[in-house]
Image: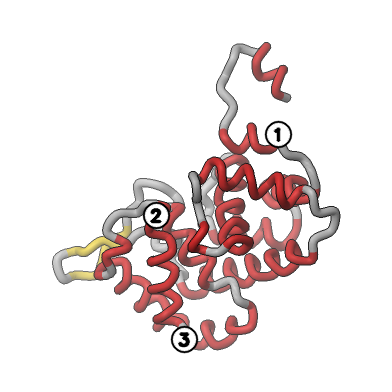
Amino acid sequence: DFFKRIQGGGTPMTDQELRRAISRGPFTTMLDGLADGEGQTSRLLAEALGGAVLPKDEKQELLLRYFALRCDGPRDFYKPSMKQHALELMKRLNKEEADARFDEWRRGLDAALELALIVFPDPKERFRLAIDNGGADPRFRTSASVQKHIWDAVIYCLSRPDRKAALVARASEVRAAFVDLMLTHPAFETLTNKGTEARVAAFEDVIS
């Protein structure tokens, strides 16, 4: 794939294409399957994205961010950089022939996607930043189909199957709490990887 790309005109490879070329193994195979539309998780992902047709690499990027958070936690997320963290993670996890954590993380992802559909039934709100609307109902930033930093906080915090039932029962309350955080909490003023830990902690506080 790499040499075909070079010989076909020198189109730059994306970060995710480079990571897949450099690091092959069970984890990369799993990511490929999820992005290609295989199984329940892929169907849930497509539904949660609200019909947005994302390129395979963009879907893999979102999935890789989730797995990075689950594997290493919000404190070490993106360090020393998102690009290097993602590559190091793929190399590390691809060395595991059959890692039981993969199944656990996939179950968590399924739970998070199902909850996201219930908590944010309007796809125009899902994984988007709420913006103050001068006292009226908040607007949601629609410059992108998915805002990755909002995705990070929502998917990571909703990925515990053991509290899924309780959060379903409080779905409207959970939505209102997260919207309020986006409007008032300083960690949502500027969306950067550096603020991930603070955004996750704030959302965890209101749903725990």
Seen at 71% across and 49% down, the residue is 92
110 left or right of 166? right
Q: Give whichever of 129, 25 is nearer the camera.
A: 25
Determine which residue is flagged by label 2. 194
What secondary structure is found at the residue carrying circle 2? helix
CA–CA distance in space, label 1 to label 3: 44 Å
Q: Give whichever of 100, 176 is nearer the camera.
A: 100
Q: Position of residue 62 (x, y in %)?
A: 55, 51
Q: Position of residue 191 (x, y in %)?
A: 35, 54
Q: Position of residue 98 (x, y in %)?
A: 84, 58
User: Amino acid under label 2?
Assistant: Lys
Identify the mark nearer the N-term, 1 or 2.
1
The answer to whether residue 37 of the structure is visible from this angle is no
Contact (CB < 8 A) between labels 1 and 2? no
Q: Give whichever of 7, 131 is nearer the camera.
A: 7
Tell which tag, 1 or 3, sits nearer the viewer: 1
Residue 22: mark in rendering = 1
Q: Position of residue 173 (x, y in %)?
A: 40, 83
Please rate how many residues cluster around mark 1, counting C-alpha atoms within 10 Å: few if below 14, some from 14 to 19, many from 20: few
What secondary structure is found at the residue carrying circle 3? loop
User: Amino acid under label 3?
Assistant: Arg
CA–CA distance in space, label 2 to label 3: 29 Å
Residue 170: mark in rendering = 3
Q: Quadrant of the N terminus?
A: top right
CA–CA distance in space, label 1 to label 2: 26 Å
35 left or right of 196? right
